[in-house]
Image (cartoon, helix red, strand yellow):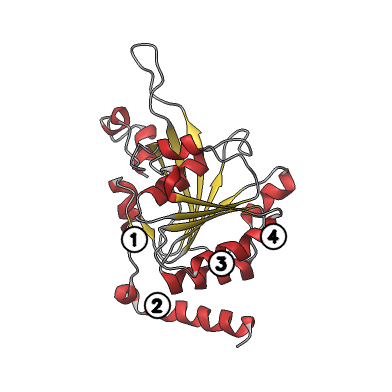
Amino acid sequence: MRAGQRLAIADLQEQIERLEGDKHRRATVPFGVGALDTHVPGGGITLGALHEIIESGPAAEFAGAATLFTAGIAARLKGPVVWCLTRRDLFAPGLAAAGLHPDRVIYVEASRDREVLPLVEEALREKGLAAVVGEVTRLSLVASRRLQLAAEASGVPALMLRRWWTVAEKNLTTLPTAAITRWRIASAPSAVLPIPGVSRQRWRVDLVRCRGAEARSWIVEGCDAKGRLAVPADLAHRPHSSPVRQAAYG
């Protein structure tokens, strides 16, 4: 069967699933933040599916919030994680701080961006993995469809971390793909402590595309040592009229 025929069949299967509603709902892993989990279909990140995570905010090409958000998702799942990349800037202690111990990560390095996608697809065919992460600049509709099909077959989530160096490369992240969710993660101001010190990091989490749900944003505390997000305590106790709280709760 040709690739075009497989894509057409997959599109028909998606249409059938949408018509049948929740009958074939896939397993999910929750974020642990009620407002976020109740908004996303299934109550969390769907396993056996393709998801896109993109850094946003100032100097996004150098920031790491999206990487830690991705690590936190993988950390909440059981089993080894395959992480495919081309750059040697992944900071293992940072992953550990987000709950993903380096001993769980299998690093697969490619020399060029276009070599990452076949590696991710091959890894998705292996059962028993917690997740497969791929760092790429380009992700076409056809390539993303192949990854979605591979993820559906194995039940392993594919987490594509979009990276870039130039504005032209950044613009590629706005193009459509077959991912069922697209997230943009940016650092947000942390709480001011009464004593000198560093408080828990905060992120603005934007769900910009989701099959079956509207776009929405939240302010959350970054991943703890078990990969869990949290609602900032000072935002949780503000009146409902507060615009910050509305952002936190969508």
Can you identify the residue that label 2 sits on?
Answer: 17
Camera-near label (1 vs 4) is 4
Measure the C-alpha gap from mark 3 to mark 2.
23 Å
Q: Residue at x 42, y 68 (%)?
A: 127
Measure the C-alpha gap from mark 1 to mark 3.
20 Å
Could you tell whether 221 is left or right of 174 in the image?
left
Quick one: which residue is furthest to the bottom in this view? Answer: 1
Q: Residue at x 51, y 79 (%)?
A: 10
Seen in the picture, residue 62 relative to 74 is either above or below; the reply is above
Asked if marks 1 and 3 touch (Cβ < 8 Å), the reply is: no
Q: Is residue 223 visible?
A: yes
Asked if marks 4 and 2 touch (Cβ < 8 Å), the reply is: no
Could you tell whether 48 is left or right of 161 in the image?
left
Q: Callout 4: helix, strand or loop? A: helix
**Amino acid type of the residue that numbered disc 2 sits on in the rendered structure:** Glu
Instruction: Kindly identify which numbered label has been placed on residue 121.
Output: 3
Q: Callout 3: helix, strand or loop? A: helix
Can you identify the residue that label 4 sits on?
Answer: 114
